[in-house]
Image (spheres, rainbow, N blue to C red):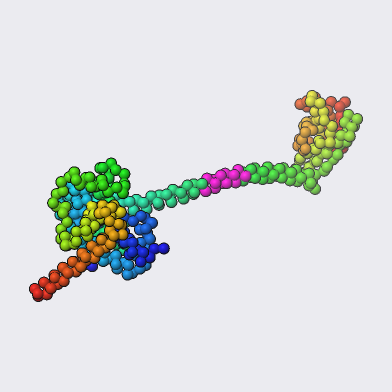
Amino acid sequence: MKKSFDDNEAITRLMSGDNDALFQLYDKYSGALYGVILRMCRDQTKAEDLLQETFIKIWRSIDSYDSSKGRFYTWAYRIARNTTLNSMRSKEKLIQTDDFRVYDSKETNEEVPDYTELKGSIKTLEPHHQEAITLVYYRGYTHKQAHKAMGVPLGTFKSYVRQALKQLRKTYTKKLVYIWIFLELMA
Amino acid sequence: MMDKKKILDEGLLELYLTGELSEELTNAVEEVLEKDKSLKEHFDVLESDFEQMGMEQAIVPPNIVKSRLKNAVGQTKTNWLPLGIAASFALVFGLSTFWLYEKWQNAEQNLNTLQMQTSELERKVNNLESEFRLTSNRLESINNPDVTPLVLYGNSKAPNGKVIAYINHKSQLVLVNPKGLPRLPNDKTYQMWSDVNGEMINMGIVPTDKELVTLKYIENAESLNLTIEPAGGSEHPTVEELVSNIII
């Protein structure tokens, strides 16, 4: 809750033209957004440009952000995702299409650096849940593209995503419990 | 009709989260989220997990990105809001100025018309006033107890001819109304004479185109005599051309 309060304060300052607030938001979210962009485009130089572009878009369009509709991270994630997808599309000179194979062919041509590997709690998920989350949140696939990529029906795919998120939540809760126990023991 | 059940069953919240929904569906989901508190709570948890996952997958970007961002943002952000407000005001002022200008032009035109009408009326009033003054002066010089009106009837030289003379001995004025005289050819004119001890003294010519002619007052005149003379008048009366006479 405190985090979100800080966000709101920074966002208000940014809306009134205080650029320092942008760097405050950058310090907090650039890592998470860079993680998304880099995993999607798999090109470090390009990912750096796209991250910069994402924050410039945030800076320009902060007036359109409505905190009552959702978290700042969600809003910023959408900007990062769309910016990256647009850039990949224009690079490939492809019109938007449901054909996900263009991404596949790209992957096979490029060596995937290790830093795009997912880490943390996601790794504890079952492989198909991991893949579902990766495709949708870290590869920029739409649900329609992703279910085809995985070769399962859309409904099944949706339930994979939901189950995966549920599983993750349990992990987070467990972690919190461990931290709590740890803190209790320390005290 | 969109409702909580449909949103949950179809997994629309997950799609909404990543911005994959069409504008129409986005609006529909947002509408339900706004109304349904339990769905909003559900979404809050989803968002929170999503953010946590994001933080967990974070990769620290090189510092160069931040410095480049600082450079890019360093150039002052154009804040369109005050400019927009200023532009709206300018538009409003512009329109109202135009409107006022139109009004002003109309008023100016009306004023000009009114001014023209006023000066026209003024001119008419002046004319009427001077005509009235003239008429009342004439009336005063005629309709006065000191004035003796005399009527001179024409003889065979001017049959039916008639001249009315008004003599004021007190103010020594003689006025004649020649309107009753027959018109003469251009080379002839009527001339009035006073008889003083048998001598005819010139009182002046009597043009027939005027309503009232002022003549010279001659003291001790015994009679008035009207003759026809060559144009411009004579020094001595042509007795043969006597038209009328009357004893005062």
Q: Quadrant of residue B27?
A: bottom left
Give left or right: position of B157 versus A129.
right
Q: Is residue B48 magenta?
A: no
> Where residue A181 sits in the image (x, y, percent)?
12, 73
Q: Which residues are magenta?
A: B103-117
Q: Quadrant of residue B191?
A: top right
Is residue A161 in view? Answer: yes
Q: Nearer the viewer, residue B201 or A165?
A: A165
> Where residue B80 sits in the image (x, y, percent)?
33, 51
Q: Quadrant of residue A124?
A: bottom left
Q: Is residue B114 magenta?
A: yes
Q: Is residue B123 above or below residue B85?
A: above
> Where residue B86 sits in the image (x, y, percent)?
37, 51
Q: Nearer the viewer, residue B146 or A70?
A: A70
Instruction: Spot the residue most to the right.
Output: B156
Q: For the C terminus of chain B, give its image quadrant.
A: top right
> Where residue A29 sits in the image (x, y, percent)?
20, 57
Q: For the N terminus of chain B, give its image quadrant.
A: bottom left
Q: How many marks?
A: 0
Residue at 31% across, 61% down:
B11
Give left or right: position of B119 versus B219.
left
